[in-house]
Image (cartoon, rainbow, N blue to C red):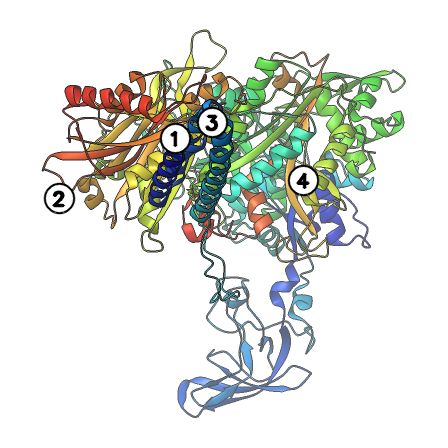
Amino acid sequence: MKNKLNELRAEFLEELSRATNNDHLRDLELKFLSRKGQLSELMGGLKDLSAELKKESGELANTVKKELQDKFEEMKKSLNSYVSKTENIDVTLPGNKISQGHLNPITLVQNELEDIFSSLGFMILDGPELESDYFNFTALNVPPSHPARDMQDTFYVDQKNKDGQYDLLMRTQTSPVQIRAMLKYGAPLKALVPGRCFRNEATDARHDHTFYQVEGLLIGKDISFANLKSFLELVGQKLFGPNTKLRMRPKFFPFVEPGNNGEYTCFLCQGKGCRVCKYTGWLEIVGAGLIHPDVLRAGGIDPEVYSGLAFGFGLTRLAMLKYNINDVRLFNSGDIKFLEQF
Amino acid sequence: MYISLNWLKDYVKIPSKLKPENIAAELTGHTVEVESFTNSAEQFNHVVVGKVLEVAKHPNADRLRVTVVDVKKGKLNIVCGAPNVAPGQLVAVALVGAILPNGLEIKESLIRGEKSEGMICAEDELGLGKGHDGIMVLRDSAKIGEAFSKYLKVDDIVLEIDNKSLSNRPDLLNHYGIARELSAIYNLTLIPYEKVLDKKWDFLSVKENKLEVKINALDACPRYLAVKVKNIEVKESPSWLKERLVAANQRPINNIVDLTNYVMFDCGQPMHAFDAAKVKKIVVRRAEKDETMETLDEKARVLSVEDLVITDGNEPIALAGIMGGHGSEISPETTELLLESANFAAAGIRKTSQKLGLRTEASVRFEKSLDTALPEIALFRFLTLLKKICPKMEIDSPLIDIDNSDHQEKTVELDLAWLDKKIGQAIKKTDVINTLERLGFVIADSKAEVLSVKIPSWRAAKDVANKEDIAEEVLRLYGYDNINSQMPASAMELPEINEERLIERKVKNVLCLKNSLNEAYNYSFVGEDQLKKLNIDYSNYLKLANPLSGIHNLLRQSLVPGLIANIKSNQFKSENFGFFEVGSVFFKTVGTLIKDKSEGSFLPYQEKHLGLAITGDDDLFGRLKGIIDSLLKNALGQRIEAEYFVIEEKPGWADTNAIARVIVGSQELGLVSLLSVEASASNNLKRPVAIAELNFNKLVELVLRQPSFQFTEAPKYPALSRDLAFVVDNKILYNDLKKEMVEFNSLIKSVELFDVYIGNKLEGGKKSLAFHLSYQSEERTLTSEEVDKIQASLISLMAEKFEAQLRSF
């Protein structure tokens, strides 16, 4: 027994000295030290020895067991620790550069708007960028040859219908989604529609043929002008801060009646007057109105039962104002130096 | 449009205490936005009356003179080139600092060595005429030192109004219309237009008819008035007429043309005067196909059958409602006029004007639908004023009035209870009635609770038609500022969540924050050259009918061209970088969104794609696949890896060896590839580029189909891991090796590739793939022996199936 114990001890220590990782340790532990390991097996033979031998061998077995366990733990510790090399650290060195990508500022502003309106119980909707003349104009109370079409230079898709007319276009506004939403969801309805729009106009620092708009609509029973005003005040305060004031002016949009624009206290100068607000203290931001009964009808909603308010503004313009960006073309430029700032 | 305050005063007494800024603000607040207002005296800032005291020859220039001019504040030395300058003259002197109407800025200067402290002005320099023969000599009543604007009595204020904001209000495209609004806003008396026109004229009887008018297109010309006038002298307009036209930003031409313009700016009706000697009769008809005519601007116009023309029975003499013809225009020799005052249908005018790219003051008005009562009123207004400027004029024909217009009066029922509800606030009945009456609406019975409101003819054409329109009239004059805001009452409802948006947001965040890609927004349009360079066939692309340029004339079907352009435009700014974009692409095939009300018509198919592009020097192909895995893990909320399969149909820009389909579960999402060396070269790219394009809509479906994530308890029994490296032929695919290993034994829980080696330590045509295999049982602790046994048979199977040799570490 004594010999066997010593052999086992030697074998264990030999193998332990060659262990270089935890897997080896685990194998060693299984082989020698576990409940079914060789040491246990050997010690299991003690019960067959005479009392005297049992005592003697038992003591030795316990000593060996303790030694092996200690050596094992020691090896485990040394395998799982490291040498400190901190003597020469310059603690003032900067952190390592962790690379990061950047979202387009349009996305940032859009997310912000979606969060605001979601919190007010609005659905966030989207619609096709390639639209039909019907949804972009006719259903919005802008029949063919209506002069209001001049307000928006339109890109038409080179595909004529059976009457020989171009009736597919790149949407000039997010408003067609109003009709699609009404047809899909009916009334009452609360929806916000951010999205890409197109106008066929020459590009410069202030104009791009591709830009983003946001459109909101709220349809219910007895929606009044007082509701619209109150709602626009709330929108202004959410966008530009709690002290923002609203000023409304009549303005013609075919899909609302009455129609108006809304100006907010210039958030850059707090209404004192600055270059951006052309020293008026006000920024013209939003176009709005009570939804025209013909538009509700086109959306399959009875204007004698329901009424609604709608508003829209330039998401691109908002982003330009918010971040003081003076060239609209930057948004679509894919310029890494521009994006890296956001 | 420019509105002169002096002109407005003809019709409404504007109190002198009303400041122009107030008028501009009130008009903006109640009617239409006034963009700016200017004082017409401002153009003569720093121009004063001076008296020439001395005139001497310039010592160094024969044609110049050196003068001394008294401007009261002092005596100025001024070098002058005019031959007519003489001592004692009263002249207009532009002082240093003046910027003249012709743009000339006056500075103190040395002219051929002589100091000059200002300029003595000629007429044209002051914008007052064409005269440049000599300096303008003023009347003796001029006071030395007084402002030149005062001498001229210019004290007008001109308001500028944006035409675009008047697209529904043609009644405001003139002074009388604006005067009417001001009278309503300020509650001022409006002088009836009847008061400024004389209707009593001795028109000849029809028996003596010398004027034949025929309308062959009644739908396009609802009303046509014509009359001939003789004993006309065509000359320069009197100064009051010129001043007004200048205020309205219209160049004076001659008294007759100026007067037609004056009437248009006065009451809104465009008129036309033909030289009656050249026009014997009038036939209004549609143009013939390819018929040509020369318009006043001396341009030849090719017409089509939808265009409306005024003819003399044969040739077109005017493009109806847009511009007169060159042949029949008023000339200095004209002595008799044929006056036209007509109404043309809006749609046709708009179409022709757009097609020809010819927008005139007349077409801008007609295309907004004018009042059919107006031609008659305007004609009388014209004759009244013509008498004033050509006192010898005589009527030389009967008054022709071919009137097929609909004069039916429109009435709208306005329920006051409804109105209060619509506005959200009670408005006093008397306020409602007063407001509407001041705007020209007529209320039949002011005692009724439901008012019967008659719409005035000038608002009835396309503007006011229903009770909502009337509500706006009341509201805007009542004042938006006077309405108390009130939040809408709304039921508590959970809005439908737009899952796609939420996933899009997550995807963007993962790509940007975790994988260091930048978000590109590229145009939805691409160009042929761009696609050619990428070897993309664009024969099936949708085209724009009216593109801005050739670089943006096709609707994109892939995000790849845009992303390549992004890489290119940044390759000198950065080295290892990448972009992603989520955007729509467009196809010719029919989609599922309805196009209009008609059954079975749908928009072209559109879907959203997610594009990824990276550049740099390391293993781009592998890195981009890693980005896709990271994206999937985060979007799906659990570790699901994409699988990559060999693709048959390869886009023209792809490296044919390094391109794979991306498959998740059984769903094909798109492809990942390296850009081919050829495409890279033709796009002048410096470094390799890897690209992936995934169908974003399918990705969203995949995410939504995914069962919600569940926590898995840690296994009770430890895992045993083994590393295995196989050397195989290059053609053997990872997918096949892995599949074999995963399916070999149920104790193999995972097979993970950790190294690929191709190089000179191996035979040619061979590669080594190294895997971590993890063995685990849910019932017991595995022994090394057991695992080694499984592994041994796995190794022999691999050898058998793939001729895979075990590589020792």
Look at the numbered disc 1 and give the secondary structure of its residue. helix
Q: Nearer the viewer, mark 4 or mark 2?
A: 2
Cα distance in 3D space between marks 4 and 3: 109 Å
Using the rendered image, report if marks 2 and 1 lie on a common chain. no
Q: Are marks 2 and 1 in contact (CB under 8 Å)?
A: no
Cα distance in 3D space between marks 2 and 3: 59 Å
Please give the residue where the numbered disc 4 appears in the rendered image. B32
Q: Quadrant location of residue B91?
A: bottom right
Asked if residue B390 is positioned above or below residue B696 in the image, the reply reads below
Expressed as whole percent of the image width and height from the top left, the position of residue A165 reads 39, 20
Please give the residue where the numbered disc 2 appears in the rendered image. B760
How many neighbours does mark 1 have within 10 angstroms: few (below 14), some (14-19), or many (20 or more)? some
* Lower sequence index among marks 3 and 1: 1
The chain ID associated with circle 4 is B
Asked if residue B308 is positioned above or below residue A61 in the image, the reply reads above
Using the rendered image, report if marks 4 and 2 lie on a common chain. yes
Cα distance in 3D space between marks 4 and 1: 94 Å
How many neighbours does mark 3 have within 10 angstroms: few (below 14), some (14-19), or many (20 or more)? some
Look at the numbered disc 4 and give the secondary structure of its residue. loop
Q: Nearer the viewer, mark 3 or mark 1?
A: 3
- The answer to which of B704 and B294 lies nearer the viewer is B704
- The answer to which of B198 and B675 lies nearer the viewer is B675
Is residue A342 in sight in this rendering?
yes
Looking at numbered disc 3 in the image, what kind of residue is underneath it?
Leu
Looking at numbered disc 4 in the image, what kind of residue is underneath it?
Val
On residue A46, the disc is 3
